[in-house]
Amino acid sequence: MLKLSQVLEFIQNADQSEIRSIKNAVAIKRSELAHDAKLSFRIGDMVGIDHKKISPNETFKITKINSKNIKVQGDNGSYTVSPNLLVKKTFKVV
C-alpha cells in the first residue's frame, strides 16, 4: 500500500494525461462511495446533516431518496443533500 506522501509526490510530478487518469479514478470512487452511502438509508430514517451551516443537534427525517441526493425534512425546513453528508441518529428508549 502506498503512503499518502508517495501519492502526493507522484501527483506533483505527473503530466496532463496522468492527472486526467487520477481525476477520473477519484470521480469513480466518489460515485461508488455515494452510492454505498445512499443504500444505507431508508425513507423514515432519522438523520443529522454533517455541514458547517447546520447544527449537529438538529434531527431530520428522510422523505425521499433520489438517484443522487436524499430529501430530508426538519423543524426548520427541508433540504436536498448528498448521502455523504447524512449521519444516522440513534435514540435511546428510557
Image (spheres, rainbow, N blue to C red):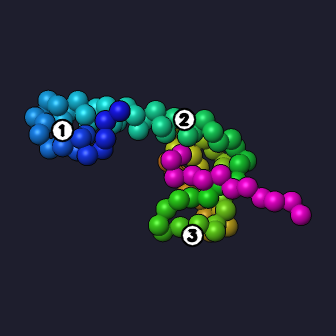
Whole-Å distance between the Cαs marked 2 and 1?
29 Å
Residue tagged 2: 36
Return the x and y of residue 16 as percentages of the image width and height: 11, 34
- Tell me the magenta residue range: 83-94
The answer to which of 65 and 26 lies nearer the viewer is 26
SS class, disc 3: loop
Which residue: 14% across, 44% down?
12
Whole-Å distance between the Cαs marked 3 and 2?
25 Å
Which residue: 66% across, 58% down?
60
Q: Earlier in the sequence, mark 2 or mark 1?
A: 1
Q: Earlier in the sequence, mark 3 or mark 2?
A: 2
Choose mark 2 or mark 1, whichever is in front: 1
Q: Is residue 47 magenta?
A: no
Q: Quadrant of the N terminus?
A: top left
Choose mark 1 or mark 3, whichever is in front: 1
Whole-Å distance between the Cαs marked 1 and 3?
39 Å
Q: Quadrant of residue 93?
A: bottom right
Q: Residues within 10 Å of mark 3 (few under 14, many from 20)?
A: few
Which residue: 71% across, 48% down?
45
Amino acid carrying mark 1 in the image: Phe
